[in-house]
Amino acid sequence: MADMNPKKTPMPEQDPKVRARNFQEVTTGYTAEMAQTEAARCLQCKKPLCVQGCPVNVHIPDFIAKVAAGEFNEAYNVITSTNTLPAVCGRVCPQETQCEARCVRGKKGDPVGIGRLERFVADWHRENSIPETAAIEKNGRRVAVVGSGPAGLACAGDLARAGCDVTVFEAFHAFGGVLVYGIPEFRLPKAVVRNEVTGLMEMGVEFRQDMIIGRTLTVDELFADGYEAVFIGSGAGLPQFMNIEGESYLNVFSANEYLTRINLMKAYLPEYDTPAPVSRVVTVVGGGNVAMDAARSALRMGAEKVFIVYRRSMEELPARAEEVHHAMEEGVVFRLLCNPTRVLGDENGRCCGLECIEMELGEPDASGRRRPIPREGSEFTIDCDTVIMALGTRPNPLLHTTTEGLDADRHGCLITDETTATTRKGVFAGGDAVTGSATVILAMGSGKKAAASILEYLKNK
């Protein structure tokens, strides 16, 4: 019989005052006893709505039942039958709006901690299990995957399991895409990402770094080299700015650049010679998860004070509730219903402040959220020496401008049909390259869908 405790088993985490000055993981994970206690809260519904909320269709009640029984390796096998990156998803998926949002336990209390249990299972397997090297029967087909982010890794994993020879081409010197350059160490340790990539290598997936498709090699050259299909999962790494006065001053960054310097180039470690500003006061513009990551990283880089400036209210804030909660605990100050109008600079061309105006919410706009309207005469200034713009990203136009027949929309997103096929025969695409900036798990879901479409394409080719 299920444990009817209405509350989730608490997740152990570092003290906010301590963790705000280090890059170690904030939450330390369940023990086996905690995991079994939380798993016992699952009602094992005959029609599990939670599975419908999972973009990669993890068999959630099945793996939770294995956890409750102490069969952790079996639980891992259940998860990985559909999910290539369980240790990643258990940490960064917005479960509260997906699987856990459908959990019936959430009607009269907390939903089952599905993400926490998934993380526990993946971590337990990494620490306790001997890698399995079951032989995969090859089918003789070759597929190129552009980008080693979540979409590319999910696609590569499913294709490799089906017997394809898969090569992943990554523009950077490290594999993992946004998982390594965008998400901070304190939320997603890079050792976890490396372990997931290693698992794919053991399945036979080849990884090639420093390969900019569209420059180092073109899509046409991939086909000429013998690849029968190409999947594009190159993400959305082109940052957006507000186009206000003063954005060209020194110490005005896109969140993409700021986080890349810290996460991929290890600016927080003294042994790495990575230029990054030592700021006194940092203002981050935006309200999404990337804004939270940038603000919390700025604290850990030594900032005395960090502000979040967002033009809507807390109810419209798009970041995960957990990330907002952690940011507030760590001391990030939220200036809501405010919008920047100008970056101020000193005589040396460096940022010295951000001029803002107060906003009020009007009628809903096309996004369904109430449109922010400036309040006349409410201008004010935040004194700061660094401004970080966390306003979203778009796909880089390089691929569609160097590949004949590959069409994109006005935002630079590749155009695909319901099968993930692009307008160029044999080329498929998914993740942020198609949707613009979105979540890790949605990118993985599109990568898995593309893998199925590619296998069907190769069968009929």
Image: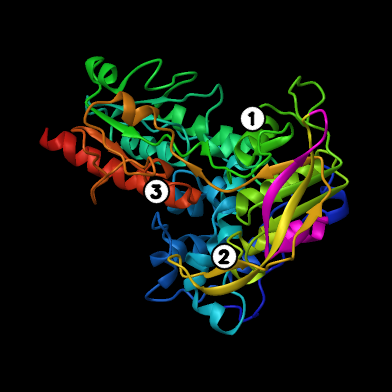
Kind of residue at badge 1: Leu
Q: Which residue is mark 2?
A: 68
Q: Position of residue 110 (x, y in %)?
A: 61, 76
- Asked which secondary structure carries label 2, the reply is helix
Which residue is at the front of the view, 6 or 15? Answer: 15
- Asked which secondary structure carries label 1, the reply is loop
Residue 3 vertical placement versus 415 (above, below): below
Q: Nearer the viewer, mark 1 or mark 2?
A: 1
Confirm whether residue 81 shows in the render.
no
Q: Which residue is mark 3?
A: 435
319 relative position to 205: left or right = right
Confirm whether residue 398 shows in the render.
yes
Residue positioned 40% across, 40% down in the render: 433
* Residue farthest along the bottom direction in this orientation: 108
- Asked which secondary structure carries label 3, the reply is helix
363 relative position to 280: left or right = left
Kind of residue at badge 2: Ala
Residues rendered magenta in the picture: 325-348
367 relative position to 116: left or right = left
Q: Nearer the viewer, mark 3 or mark 1?
A: 3
Badge 3 or badge 2: first in the primary sequence: 2
Residue positioned 78% across, 33% down in the render: 350
Badge 1 or badge 2: first in the primary sequence: 2
Q: Position of residue 96 (x, y in %)?
A: 55, 66
Which residue is at the front of the view, 399 or 347? Answer: 347
Q: Which residue is mark 1?
A: 264
449 relative position to 397: left or right = left
Within the magenta stretch, is there residue 260?
no
Q: Position of residue 430 (x, y in %)?
A: 35, 43
| Cα–Cα span, label 1 and label 2 | 37 Å
